[in-house]
């Protein structure tokens, strides 16, 4: 019997249909000589420390470090029934085809089961980028050998074991040290979560320490041949900061008065340049999350869930967990089929698609830049928009628009800079005249350039101006402004920062590595990292933004700098890539990680931490101070006299108006 092992039931159903395995069994589909079964994500998980000995149930410094001699896994209780199904089928299989998601994690989901169940038969690999029928048939006809992907499993296993060693040991280490210093919360440390948290902590500190500086601008309304346009005063040297802002109010006031009195401004130069903008690349998951956060206000996990549904449920788009915005050149042959499917999906697209050039090769077609998965695009078959939710349709149309943009001309416009003088003062006007809409006809709602958004003058249409021409001064406005602090992260911007974290690293080799690996975390894990930080109370949502909690500041100030340094993550990512390439073994990597964790434990074991303990509002019952703690539903303020006093306050409550807990039973600190 040939056995196909999928990652999820829905994938199993799709593959079984193509294979003709139509008979439904218990946790599987059966057909002539073939069976299709599935996992439900990970059916097994790394065993917790207490599985290695009763002594590890209690958190204490004496038990650290915990370095397993032989790694153990546990069968997840929630999916134990399906595990039994898979195990029984593996004993009967004459050949196994791994059909889990085509990435490191998918490889691990299958291979950890294969090892636990001691399957010894031949193995092949089904490598899918889309779940529509045509893509499945194509992949079934080009099965990979087991050897081609087994090192991906070793790399994923190395990542998993490194996360375990760091998370289990260092979380216990710093939590126990924190308790000795009077901090009651859990200090959770993670290989990726801690440097991610540091990004938010650092941004929040930048905002808190920012000192606003006043500056002044002079906006001038001009007209020429009854057409109005706007210009700005250019302050002279010596009156500005490095950004060209005037810091001298008197100088700005004098200039405004002169311009107002002068009445006419003379054009001294007109410079026009043709700007050609190429179409944006196709979406990788991180960029999709960033754009959907900005455009639709979606959090990153919601965007991932929608992209997964478009791929898995609706068969409308390709594999979503891609870190690549490029396409292989071989897929150019499929373009007419995809375009025909798009028209069948939404006939109103016909005029746009008729205007495309399907043979056009944009920069997105580049074999050298395609990774394990290509950019996210529509599939080869029509989709049913009526079965999608409003948000799913919005994300689908965004993905579709980026694909269509590849076959449209450049967006072209003329940027004109006009310099003028008035009463000895210098003015500048900037204009923009669109020459060819190009790809922007399908991406009309794309956010404008930030500089353009901040200064509407950059997108104005100027009258026909030439050197020596006189323009009438219609109005002059002196405006008092202040410099603004950095903006708090939104979830989408945090994902962008995780991808672009290389700019925070000074070592040129590590900087390049972070660029090559697209930062910290992966496309598949960044959403879960942010979700985990929110769940643990380290990040708090405020509108569309995320801010660091008091516990987050405590954690980042407590752990060694190397743990929160993205450069350390770069070293790990480099090692994981080496494992996948076969130049470093799994055992050697884990041995180095174990030695490093052991060194940190020994270094910090006898240190007395100086922790700033977050103080909350007064207890609503006894009036004592409260401290932030974590419970099953997240962080909350708990009376510092607990368990003698059971007073609690929700973390979202205003400090000026504490309220008593409505719980009938005391809430234990987490």
Image (cartoon, rainbow, N blue to C red):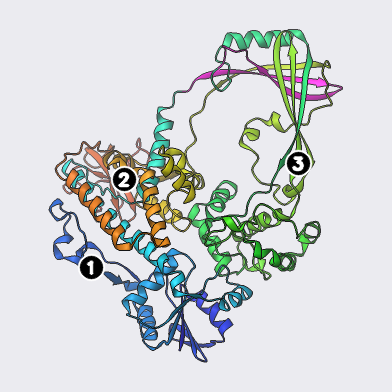
**What whole-number distance in Å separates the C-alpha atoms at marks 2 and 3?**
47 Å
Spot occupied by residue 369 in the image (x, y as percentages of width and height): 57, 55
The crowd level at tag 2 (other Cα within 10 Å; few <14, some 14-19, many 20+) is many
Label 3: element kind: strand
Q: Viewer-proximal residue, 499 or 189?
A: 499
Bounds of the magenta segment:
212-240
Which quarter of the figure is the N terminus placed in?
A: bottom left
Of residue 651 and residue 163, the one placed in the foreground of this image is 163
Q: Secondary structure at mark 2?
A: helix
Upstream in sequence: badge 2 or badge 3: 3
Which of marks 2 and 1 precedes in the sequence?
1
**Quarter-of-image position of residue 418:** top right
Dot 3, crowdedness within 10 Å: few (<14), some or many (≥20)? some
- The label on residue 596 is none
Closer to the chain start, of discs 1 and 3, is 1
Give how far across and how far down residue 490 sits, in percent.
49, 44
The answer to whether residue 348 of the structure is visible from this angle is yes
Gap between marks 1 and 3 measured at Cα = 62 Å
Q: Which residue is mark 1?
A: 70
Q: Is 616 in front, or is 73?
A: 73
User: Tags 2 and 3 in contact by the CB under 8 Å rule?
Assistant: no
* Residue 228: in magenta span: yes
Q: Is residue 529 left or right of residue 221?
A: left
Residue at x 13% of width, y 61% of height:
55
Which residue corresponds to the image point at 35% horizontal and 64% vertical from the top-left?
Answer: 157
Work out whether residue 570 or residue 487 is closer to the camera in this orientation and state it: 570
Q: Position of residue 660 (x, y in %)?
A: 30, 45
Q: Which residue is mark 3?
A: 412
Q: Are marks 1 and 3 in contact (CB under 8 Å)?
A: no
Residue picked out by circle 2: 563
């Amino acid at each position: 019997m040939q056995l196909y092992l999928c990652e999820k039931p829905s994938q199993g159903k799709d593959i079984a249909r193509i294979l003709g395995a139509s008979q439904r069994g218990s946790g599987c589909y059966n057909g002539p000589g073939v069976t299709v079964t599935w996992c439900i994500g990970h059916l097994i998980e790394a065993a917790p420390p207490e599985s290695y000995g009763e002594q590890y149930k209690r958190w204490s410094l004496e038990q650290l470090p915990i370095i397993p001699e032989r790694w153990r896994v546990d069968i997840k209780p929630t999916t134990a029934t399906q595990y039994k199904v898979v195990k029984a089928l593996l004993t009967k299989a004459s050949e196994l085809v791994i059909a889990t998601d085509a990435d490191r994690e998918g490889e691990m989901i299958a291979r950890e089961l294969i090892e636990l169940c001691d399957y010894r038969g031949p193995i092949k690999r089904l490598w899918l980028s889309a779940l529509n029928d045509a893509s499945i048939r194509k992949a079934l006809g080009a099965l990979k050998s087991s050897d081609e992907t087994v090192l991906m499993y070793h790399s994923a296993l190395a990542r998993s074991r490194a996360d375990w060693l760091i998370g289990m040991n260092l979380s216990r280490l710093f939590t126990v040290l924190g308790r000795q210093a009077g901090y009651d919360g859990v200090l959770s440390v993670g290989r990726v979560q801690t440097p991610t948290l540091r990004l938010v902590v650092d941004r929040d500190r930048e905002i808190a320490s920012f000192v606003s500086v006043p500056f002044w601008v002079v906006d001038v309304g001009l007209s020429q041949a009854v057409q109005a346009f706007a210009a700005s005063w250019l302050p002279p040297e010596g009156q500005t900061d490095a950004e060209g802002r005037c810091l001298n109010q008197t100088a700005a006031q004098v200039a405004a008065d002169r311009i107002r009195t002068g009445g006419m401004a003379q054009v001294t130069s007109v410079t026009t340049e043709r700007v050609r903008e190429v179409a944006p690349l196709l979406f990788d998951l991180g960029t999709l999350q960033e754009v959907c956060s900005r455009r639709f206000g979606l959090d990153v996990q919601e965007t991932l869930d929608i992209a997964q549904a478009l791929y898995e449920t609706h068969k409308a788009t390709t594999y979503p967990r891609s870190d690549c915005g490029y396409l292989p050149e071989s897929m150019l042959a499929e373009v007419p089929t995809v375009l025909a499917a798009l028209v069948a999906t939404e006939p109103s697209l016909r005029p746009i698609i008729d205007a495309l050039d399907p043979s056009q090769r944009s920069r997105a077609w580049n074999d050298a830049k395609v990774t394990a998965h290509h950019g996210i695009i529509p599939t080869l078959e029509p989709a049913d928009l009526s079965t999608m939710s409003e948000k799913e349709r919005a994300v689908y149309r965004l993905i579709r628009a980026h694909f269509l943009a590849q076959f449209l001309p450049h967006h072209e416009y003329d940027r004109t800079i006009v310099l003028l003088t008035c009463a000895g003062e210098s003015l500048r006007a900037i204009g923009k005249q669109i020459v060819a809409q190009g790809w922007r006809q399908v991406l009309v709602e794309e956010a404008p350039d930030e500089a353009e958004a901040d200064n509407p003058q950059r997108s104005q249409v100027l009258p026909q101006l030439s050197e020596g021409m006189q323009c009438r001064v219609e109005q002059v406005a002196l405006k008092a402004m202040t410099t603004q602090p950095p903006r708090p992260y939104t979830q989408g911007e945090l994902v962008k920062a995780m991808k672009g974290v290389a700019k925070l690293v000074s070592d040129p080799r590590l900087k390049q590595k972070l660029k090559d690996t697209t930062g910290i975390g992966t496309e598949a894990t960044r959403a879960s990292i942010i979700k985990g930080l929110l769940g643990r109370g380290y990040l708090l949502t405020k509108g569309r933004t995320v801010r660091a909690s008091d516990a987050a500041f405590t954690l980042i100030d407590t752990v060694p700098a190397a743990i929160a340094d993205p450069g350390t993550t770069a070293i790990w990512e480099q090692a994981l890539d080496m494992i996948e390439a076969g130049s470093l073994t799994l055992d050697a990597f884990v041995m180095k990680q174990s030695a490093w964790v052991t060194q940190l434990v020994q270094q910090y074991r006898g240190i007395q931490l100086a922790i700033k303990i977050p103080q909350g509002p007064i207890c609503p019952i006894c009036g004592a101070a409260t401290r932030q703690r974590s419970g099953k539903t997240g962080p909350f303020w708990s009376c510092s006299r607990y368990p003698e006093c059971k007073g609690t306050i929700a973390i979202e409550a205003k400090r000026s108006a504490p309220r008593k807990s409505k719980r009938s039973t005391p809430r234990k600190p987490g």
